[in-house]
Image (cartoon, grey):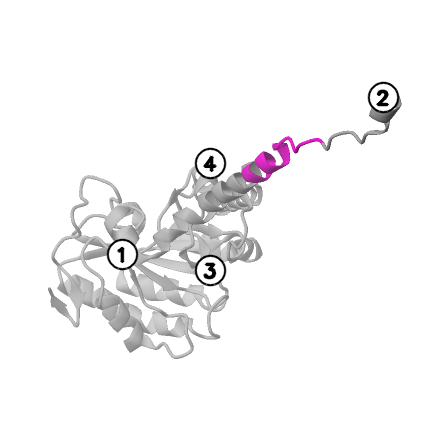
Amino acid sequence: MSARRSADPSPTPRPSGIPRRAAVGAALALGATAAWHIGPAGTWLPAVRHTLFPDLDGQGNPGHVALTFDDGPSPESTPLFLRALDELSVRATFFVLGDALRHDPRIGHAIAGRGHEIAVHGWHHERPWYPTPWRDAHDLARAADLVQQVCGRRPRWYRPPYGILTGGRWAAARRAGMRPVLWSASGHDWTAEADGASVLAEITGSLRGGGTVLLHDSDCTSAPGAWHAALDALPELVSHCREAGLTVGPLAEHEVGGPGRGSGGTARCRRGRAW
């Protein structure tokens, strides 16, 4: 009897369930990371940020319009924008790329020297396909440090490339002492088909008092020469805003989230009339 028992096979052990729990935990962690990374990027949608995140939408003093430029500095085009802004007696905010500023620091000096505000657009102009929080923190800190070194003042604002504000970029901007801000009206000036008239129509179709305008002083990520469209639209854009009783200036004077911010005001720049 004992010999027969010893020959019997041992019972098959039951799975403990630990591998399944580990897999579920890993899936939940991955899902949480993805949500943290891409969730804030929903603010790329204008209706979402205008309604739920007015500060991120660049809504400020209803009697003021913030004029901003992305993607520079460019030795070819940025000096022309500086000259045009001088002729219009307007100051603006330039969101610069760290790598471009590193190659042309003299243009950064010129921007600051003419009274314009300098902000950070990133180190490179890249889409955030995957979470890279450590790289985001390093690149934004490096860009902010360079702006301070070249221009003499710590940047206050950050605008992510393509307007895609991930969780990592948001956290990195805050860590570097900058405030994220996107825009309320865009000229769509990055295409080969854009011209001064189309840029003006795009902006005036949606801009109202308290809004922030997005244009580009460089074609580093646009169609070659696309910056001409923004430059051509500038004089009439400023004229339209002034005829509507709105002042035009940098974000530093826009009171984003400040006491002057209301519902966006009623004055609108459109075809030379106040709406």
Query: Real-space Cα distance between discs 3 and 2?
Result: 90 Å
What residue would you read off at disc 3? 72
Looking at the image, residue 6 lies above or below residue 187: above
Tell which circle, 4 or 1, labels the residue nearer the N-terminal end.
1
230 w.r.t. 171: above or below: below
Of marks 1 and 2, which one's residue comes earlier in the chain?
2
Q: Secondary structure at mark 1?
A: helix
Q: Secondary structure at mark 3?
A: strand
Q: Residues under labels 3 and 1: Cα distance?
A: 27 Å
Q: Position of residue 42 (x, y in %)?
A: 37, 52
Q: Nearer the viewer, mark 1 or mark 2?
A: 2
Element on which disc 2 rests: loop
Q: Is residue 233 magenta?
A: no
The local crowd at label 4, few if under 14, some if 14 to 19, many if 20 or more residues have their Cα within 10 Å, is few
Residue 116 visible: no
Q: Are marks 2 and 4 in contact (CB under 8 Å)?
A: no
Residue of label 1: 47
Mark 3–mark 4 CB contact (< 8 Å): no
Start and end of the magenta stretch?
13-24
At 19% from the left and 63% from the top, the residue drawn is 241
Most foreground residue, 137 or 108: 137
| The C terminus - image quarter | bottom left
User: How far apart in space, not on screen, are marks 2 and 4 (Cα)?
Assistant: 75 Å
Q: Which residue is mark 4?
A: 175
SS for callout 4 = helix
- Disc 4 marks a residue whose amino acid type is Arg
Q: Quadrant of residue 189?
A: bottom left
Residues at discs 1 and 2 in contact (Cβ within 8 Å): no
Mark 3 is surrounded, within 10 Å at the Cα level, by few (under 14), some (14 to 19) or many (20 or more) other residues, namely many
Nearer the viewer's eye, disc 3 or disc 2?
A: 2
Residue that carries the numbered disc 2 in the rendered image = 1
Taking the view exactly as shown, the residue that stands out farthest to the right is 3
